[in-house]
Image: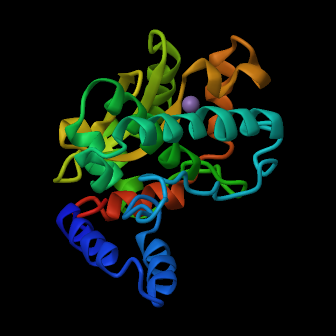
Amino acid sequence: MSDDAARLSRRQLLGTGTSVGCAWVLSSRVLEAGLFGMQQKGGSQMAFTQPPLPYAMNALVPYLSEEQIQFHYGRHHAAYFRNLNALVEGKPEAEMSLREVVKKSSGSVFNNAGQAWNHTFYWHCMSPSGGGEPKGELAAAIDRDFGSFQQFRKAFSDAAVTLFGSGWAWLASDADGKLSIMALSNADTPLRYEKEPILTIDVWEHAYYIDYRNERARFVEGFWSVVNWDFALARFKGRTGPEW
Ligand code: MN
């Protein structure tokens, strides 16, 4: 859904806020919205809601412990949503999609919106049935742009391990499907560079401090055992769509 369509739907939704049909409309809209579309709004609802994890807290064991996910999803990711909601209360950003806020905001609003969006994306980049190699047109594009999957994997890992301080390593696509690896600091995202995120790993220390202490390289290596290529392929195919 485009930002404009999301905004229009939200106005329509808010217009029906007191009707009996509201609950049904709200729940079906939330389902339709998927990961990052319209967030649940209206009444006393917060502007932005942290989406559920796409798997159980212990689903990525042994790569990530239940405690690591509890802290990362339940404390860090949740805090970005809480902070963002407090920052945008009563402001125009509260009526935007999260993606729109990420693309247009700055300062603390951007930091929290970016981190809220990035983590939601990140959870989907891993799966208990993940691992292996990319498929289909994403595999072909990786071969074309990086030489081979093994060369891509090494370049992505190197970017993640050597990123100074806190941030994210991304595989991103431009509108023509040209792939690139981006190592971005703090909450920064390919969305700010007119590129579409395809895959990411969080290399903030809070992503691995319980399970790996200071050993970022070992944390990055383990990512390949759970990487969700089905998700990455879907994102790559949808790159020209209005929402993805
Ligand atoms: Mn994180």
Q: Residue furthest bottom?
A: 21
Work out whether 26 lies above or below 99: below
Residue in view at x 32 percent, y 42 percent: 172
Question: Percent position (x, y) of residue 232?
Answer: 45, 54
Q: Is residue 223 left or right of residue 44?
A: right
Residue at horizontal 76%, vertical 55%? 56
> Ligand 1: which quarter?
top right
Percent across and percent down for residue 124 are 55, 53
Instruction: Please identify the quarter of the rendering in which residue 70 is found.
Output: top right
The image quadrant that residue 72 belongs to is top right
As rendered, which of 91 and 102 lies closer to the eye?
91
Instruction: Give coordinates of residue 63: x percent, y percent.
Output: 76, 37
Instruction: Report the front residue among 31 and 179.
Output: 31
Q: Tell me the residue at 31%/46% (across/down).
A: 90
Residue 218, percent from left and from top: 69, 21
**Nearest the camera: 87 or 126?**
87
Quadrant where the image shows the N terminus = bottom left
